[in-house]
Amino acid sequence: MDQLNSMIAFVKVAELKGFTAAAQELGLSKGTVSKLVNALEDSLRSKLFNRTTRQISLTEAGEIYYEHCVRALAEVESAQQAVQKLRTEPRGRVRISVPVTFGQLHIAPVMPNFLRTYPEIQVDMVMTNRMIDLVEEGFDICLRMSAQTPQHLVAKKLAVVRWVLCASPGYLEQAGTPQHPDELTKHRCFTFQSSLEHSLWRFKGPDAESPVLEVHVKGNYQVNNVEALNTAVVQNLGISILPTYIAGPDLLSGRLKQILPNYTPQTQYGDAICAVFMPDRHLLPKVRVMVDFLARHFGPEPYWDKGVTLA
């Protein structure tokens, strides 16, 4: 910083052709400006000014150094302006991680509109179901469905996620409709393979005081993709717990039917999709506008739930 201040003082003296004028321009004393320039000459081991009682002029070394200083100070000012714009205007690169299926269905389709709205932002989106370390991997935002958020992170709720136990009318016609969670042991239940307890389903009863019921289910299909589960269930093959952001259109059309409506599935993924970011990230306009944009897009009632009647 001392070097930078010395360069600024030197340039002002050269341009205004005097220490007094430079000191007034910089809001410093004449003695301070002289010390800064002298320190600069000492560090360079070169005389920068020819000094007389009436005027000063640049030496040959001073002329060369002046040209470089002007360019260097312009770059410094440009860098400061760029950082200031980054802090005050939505611009720069946003690196965001999203779950694969949710990203394909509900984030990718809206990204073109976001880019048109904020043309100064570059989006680097990674679709993965892996738990991301925001700091180590350099992400600004991570979309997560989780019942808990690490204490050192901030989470903003973007949309409600409702989990529904459902089957197709064709399957229920063939296998019968279960009336209690215990009856699921007699059915083909398709599970999400990456779940830690994929064969243990939990349900909250109809009353607030009701205990959580646990049922060990089995079936002939496990897959780590909920869209694939949805496809199998629609084709009359079994029962599964599905999020409405995937099953919503099939529930609305009647291709799927909610079963055991009085028992709410309890999953390890929670009941919301959240934008997770470091506390200081939210101060950046590029992060703030993306989070707010997605929250507005989904709204209080996500579009995938509109028209879908659930218990």
Image (cartoon, helix red, strand yellow):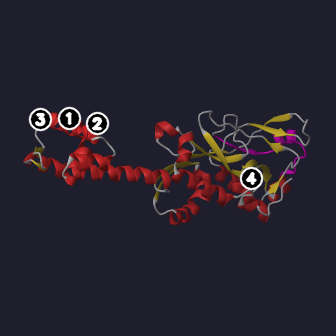
Disc 3 marks a residue whose amino acid type is Arg
In the image, 78: left or right of 14? right
- Residue 254 location, x and y as percent? 80, 63
Q: CA distance from mark 1 to mark 2?
A: 9 Å
Residue 39 shown in magenta:
no
Mark 1 touching mark 2, by CB under 8 A?
Answer: yes
The image shows residue 161, relative to residue 209, as above or below, that is below
Crowdedness of circle 1 by 10 Å Cα count: few (<14), some, many (20+)?
Answer: some
Q: CA distance from mark 3 to mark 2?
A: 17 Å
Disc 2 marks a residue whose amino acid type is Asp
Q: Which residues are magenta?
A: 175-193
The label number, if any, that marks residue 45 in the structure image: 3
Between discs 3 and 2, the one toward the N terminus: 2
- Residue 97 location, x and y as percent? 54, 47
According to the image, label 4 marks what residue?
237
According to the image, label 1 marks what residue?
39
Marks 1 and 3: which is nearer the front? Answer: 1
Q: Residue at x 28, y 45 (%)?
A: 23
Marks 4 and 1: which is nearer the front? Answer: 1
The image shows residue 200, relative to residue 64, as above or below, that is above
Q: CA distance from mark 4 to mark 1?
A: 83 Å
Marks 1 and 2: which is nearer the front? Answer: 1
